[in-house]
Amino acid sequence: MIAKKVCLVFTKNFPFSKMESYLQNELIFLHRNFDLVYFVPYHESKFDERENRIDLSSFQNLSHINLLQLPSYFFFDRLERVFDITRILLKEVFNSNNKYQTLGKVRQLFFRLKHYHAISKKISETLQIEKNGSAIYCYHYWNHDSIIIDMFLQKRFGVKSNHSFSRAHSIDLFHDDWPKGYVAFEKIKIDHLKNIFAISNIGLNYLRNKFPTYHTKFQLAYLGVPDRFSGTALFPSKPFIILTVSNIAEIKRLHLMVDIMKCLPSDQFQWIHIGDGVSKYADPLKKIAASGEINFKLLGHKNSDQIHQFYNENKILCCVNLSYMEGVPVSIMESLMHGVPCIATNVGGTSELIEDNLNGYLIDSNFTSSHVAKKIVELSEDQNKWLISSQNARGKYLNKFNSNINYSDFYQKITS
């Protein structure tokens, strides 16, 4: 009898949120490489299954574990849980470079671990049928606390993983701007994992320099997007479309696009944004779009098919990304795939996508609005330069960010 291959994919919210929609690019590869796949949205404490759900029905072997109702604990179960949590907390204090700071967070960490323990118990109960004789893989899409759930799952509930591994993006990797630089369980998580796959070279080098004794665990594995190119990338006509595609969040700094647009003639340039977000950041943009203050359209959330349709039906001058922190932005990969030059802040692994003055422009994170506006005008005034940038953009995608190549290689590594 051939053992089943079962994969647990730990996410923040997927499939109950649009925030990780780029994970859809991996669904076909999960479907092909595993007999059963369970998504574990461990950050999600409440959701309506009728809303915002990513449809998994196209793949019969993909589903999710419902964490809305976590299991109860009897007396001896509670003692075991306290023992498990205490063991991790003691290890965390021992590993800490600032034991006083860590001790001050013990109460907070205890309740986090208590919740993770209950999640691991729920996963174990869900896998009762599958875990015996099955090969279990624990895939952590983020290098976050889900790894602690994985530890409880294996050490307390007997769900042994053939391969526990994570990706490392940006916010789960670069912690210099975190409050007081404190990151819980950092060394514990690395100890537990077999591999950490950085999605950028800059992330890979960061890990190897920060944790040199673990250098063999760290590997590079780029994300990718499927090839949806229509076959033509034509120089656009006025008004030139400047496109941004992202969640509306603080890190994306979309409000700075308003100042950039004020530097450009409104009859010649139009800003279009695809994406939505929390009202704190989305509502001000909606007001600006409604006011007519600048030439701006806010299209809201679009699924992957709709985004590619927009690219194929519109001639776009450039894609802009103003984030102050990034891994390797999927939105830029999609832009390059369609042959659209990009202007983006030189943060994270963005320079692995954009070569300055070849397929777009890299700008300093502390840019001025007039400088970005000048780069946009340069692209609009030189048709030959734009066409060369477009060809270079498409070439960069084909060489490095084709999902069929990248994900086939990635899943071969983790299952072999």
Image (spheres, grey):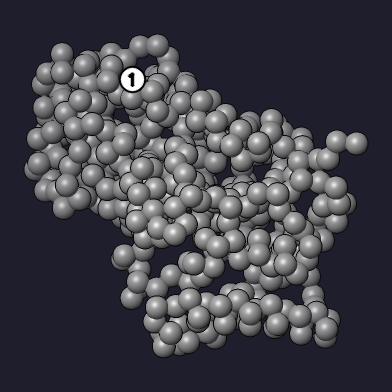
Is the residue 38 above or below the residue 72 in the image?
A: above
> SS of the residue at dot 1?
helix
Does residue 366 appear in this view? yes
Q: Is residue 111 visible?
A: no
In the displayed orientation, state which residue is furthest to the right.
1
Q: Foreground residue, 223 or 211? A: 211
Label 1: how many Cα within 10 Å (few below 14, some 14–19, many 20+): some
Q: Residue at x 81, y 40 (%)?
A: 4
* Residue at mark 1: 395
Give residue 394's position: percent from left, percent from top. 34, 20
Where, quadrant-wise, is the N terminus in this rendering? Answer: top right
Q: Which quadrant holds residue 90?
A: bottom right
Residue placed most toward the observer, 202 or 19:
202
Q: Tally the numbered discs.
A: 1
> Where residue 354 appears, x then y in whole percent?
27, 33
Against 88, residue 9 (above or below) is above
| Residue 53 percent coordinates (x, y) | 62, 46
Q: Residue 397, percent across and down? A: 38, 25
395 over 22 or under it: above or below: above
> Horizontal placement of 342 versus 198: left or right?
left
| Residue drawn at 21 percent across, 16 percent down | 388
Q: Amino acid at mark 1?
A: Gly
Residue at horizontal 44%, vertical 59%?
213
Left or right side of 87 for 204: left
